[in-house]
Image (tube, rainbow, N blue to C red):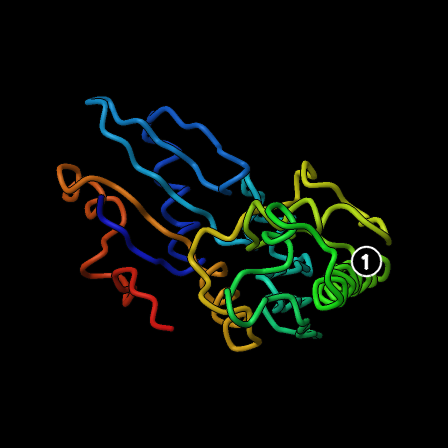
Amino acid sequence: MKHRLIKESHCIALLKQVGVSGWREEYQPEKHQIEYTLPGGERLFVRLPIQVAFPYRPIHQDNMLYQHIIILIESGLAAVGYFENGENIDHKVFRAYMVRKKQGKSQIKYLKTKGKSRAGSRVRLAETMEFFTSIRERVNSYIDTNRIDRIAISCSLTLWPYFFGGKGDLLFSKNDPRVYKVPMHVPDCTYDNLLKVNDFLMQGELKYSPEINKQIESIYHIESDTDDTDKSEEW
């Protein structure tokens, strides 16, 4: 499959042109992506920029302040940010002593094997609970004071129960239609990577087989109209 990041304006232009092509479309909300099936059975995937709703309503969207949250979580490190029209308005980085130094294993994974009897384990467990409570409180403060259109999350499935459970209930559930899993690997949950993830999500992405390259180019005019580049993320 070919991958290509495209600007919001180019993505919208593509949607308008493909919309009159008669191709069968299926929207996948968990990926914020449209899957098009061409007459020959080939497929085109269009991941929409996070600020573009489906179906696209230009009169409504062009005059709307778009507000979203990005949440990045790993064992002992997390970054949360609130954005308006792509600009980071507020953020917070969280750190906790959750990893056993010798084994390099998080306290959550250790609990599944040997329990929490030792003093060091109890300290790490307490820090773990406080870590997730603090993240939930920050996220809730954004939701309390703003209309949130999207909530993008990068978090391993192992940590999901700790983020969505515990003290200080979240003001949204994991099944909330605004929840969107970040479709890229995030190596470290830092502020710099929070901004990189936001830049990535603010762009659209095309995925298609080389066999329909000419068809896509004829619709999108990739070679002549744009300065979009092939997908390549540097961390």
Q: Residue furthest bottom?
A: 192
Q: In the image, what residue occupies the spot 31% across and 27% down?
A: 37
On screen, residue 37 above or below 225: above
Q: Position of residue 139 (x, y in %)?
A: 76, 60
Q: In the image, what residue occupies the spot 51% across and 53% down?
A: 182
Please rate how many residues cluster around mark 1, counting C-alpha atoms within 10 Å: few if below 14, some from 14 to 19, many from 20.
some
Q: Which residue is mark 1?
A: 140
Q: Nearer the viewer, residue 19 or 188?
A: 188
Q: Position of residue 148 (x, y in %)?
A: 73, 54
* Quadrant of the image containing the N terminus: top left
Q: Residue furthest front?
A: 118
Name the element at disc 1: helix
On screen, residue 169 above or below 176: below
Q: In the image, what residue occupies the spot 49% across and 69% down?
A: 188
Dot 1 amino acid type? Asn
Instruction: Tell me, yes or no, if residue 83 can be seen here.
Output: no
Relative to 160, 139 lies left or right: right
